[in-house]
């Protein structure tokens, strides 16, 4: 059973999280960042973290601002806020004497961990799963309302059976986000997981991230997986790969 926790976000509201605690000996700790509007309980987040905990790596996964059980308004977030909240999550883990050795991010969360890693206390390795190299890749999801947002300042947007409020500052922040220098200056071991059959974020993104990063860097193809890793065994397989790769970067430096 996961341990339910809350911690203060970078903008003030409390964020809700779950720490998957290993049942046996602990090899290390980490933080997981979910995709654009998915939440901590989406299959990729929950299953990867549970698999890592089974392999001895305790993982914190948390809902972004205004999603799931977290406080605040989703529209008051942005890519920058997501990055800052990952740093806050790592600070929370360090404060409870379980500093995060590893950051794992899925989809948009993968882009965010690349930007957050160097600012996050304790982090010594980074993993991206199906991540875009350009955070503004998500604009295609709300392109039907973006003109209204830019002219009116905000607009309601239906996604996943719920209504979110998209704000102009959110769109502008996402458009301004740049990862190239962050990836070049990462200077941390990086594992890139991506499926060649990902129809949401193409595998070309993984190739570009890999080419920008410095060694030690690794790429593993998640052949047969979809973007959300929803099919049976896909997320668990990703978790097993991450757990094996991370072995050299866990525990005391």
Image (cartoon, rainbow, N blue to C red):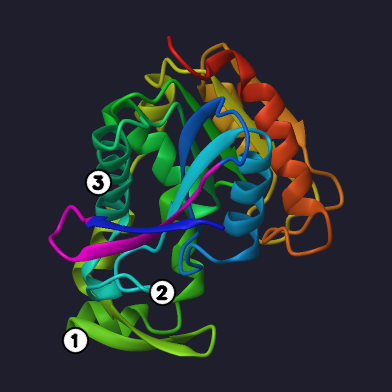
User: Looking at the image, can residue 17 be seen?
Assistant: yes
Label 1 sits on a secondary structure element that is helix
Residue at 17% across, 52% down: 10
Picture residue at 51% right of the left edge, 23% below the top: 212
**Residue 17 quadrant:** bottom left
Numbered range of the magenta stretch: 8-21
Magenta stretch holds residue 100: no
Q: Which of 207 and 128 is in front in this view?
A: 128
Q: In this view, does 148 lie above or below 20?
A: below
Instruction: Say the numbered circle drawn on residue 84.
Output: 3
Estimate how packed mark 2 is, as few (under 14), some (14 to 19) or many (20 or more) residues with alpha carbons within 10 Å: some
Q: In this view, does 70 lie to the left or right of 168?
A: right
Residue 219 position in % (x across, y down): 70, 27
Residue 5 rendering spot, x and y as whole percentages: 34, 57
Q: Residues within 10 Å of mark 1 (few under 14, many from 20)?
A: few
In terms of sequence position, does the residue under pointer 1 or pointer 3 come before the other? Answer: 3
Camera-side residue of 53 and 174? 53
The label number, if any, that marks residue 152 in the structure image = 1
Could you classify mark 3 by the number of other residues whose Cα lies within 10 Å: few (under 14), some (14-19), or many (20 or more)? many
Q: State the image coordinates of residue 229 (x, y, percent, origin top left).
A: 72, 58
Q: What element carries label 2?
A: loop
The span from disc 1 to disc 3 (Cα, nearest Å) is: 27 Å
Is residue 12 within the magenta segment?
Answer: yes
User: The C terminus appears in which quarter of the rendering?
Assistant: top left
> Which residue is at a point 61% across and 41% down the rendered structure image?
23
The residue indicated by pointer 2 is 68
- Position of 215 with respect to 220 (left or right) is left
Please name which of the two marks, 1 or 2, marks the residue nearer to the observer.
2
């Amino acid at each position: 059973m996961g341990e339910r926790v809350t911690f203060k976000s970078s903008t003030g509201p409390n964020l809700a999280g779950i720490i998957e605690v290993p049942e046996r000996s602990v090899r290390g700790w980490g933080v997981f960042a979910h995709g654009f509007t998915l939440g901590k309980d989406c299959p990729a987040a929950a299953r990867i973290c549970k698999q890592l905990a089974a392999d001895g790596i305790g993982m914190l996964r948390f809902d972004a601002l205004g999603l799931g059980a977290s406080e605040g308004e989703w529209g008051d977030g942005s890519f920058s806020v997501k990055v800052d909240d990952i740093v806050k999550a790592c600070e929370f883990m360090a404060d409870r004497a379980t500093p995060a050795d590893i950051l794992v991010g899925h989809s948009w969360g993968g882009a965010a961990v690349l930007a957050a890693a160097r600012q996050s206390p304790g982090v010594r390795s980074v993993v991206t799963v199906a991540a875009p190299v350009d955070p503004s890749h998500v604009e295609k999801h709300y392109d039907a309302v973006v003109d209204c947002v830019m002219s009116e300042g905000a607009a309601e947007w239906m996604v996943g059976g719920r209504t979110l409020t998209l704000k102009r500052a959110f769109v502008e922040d996402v458009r301004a986000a740049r990862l190239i220098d962050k990836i070049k200056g990462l200077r941390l071991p990086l594992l890139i997981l991506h499926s060649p059959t990902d129809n949401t974020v193409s595998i070309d993104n993984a190739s570009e991230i890999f080419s920008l990063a410095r060694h030690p860097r690794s790429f593993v193809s998640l052949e047969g997986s979809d973007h959300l890793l929803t099919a049976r065994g896909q997320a668990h397989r990703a978790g097993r790969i991450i757990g094996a790769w991370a072995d050299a970067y866990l525990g005391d430096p």
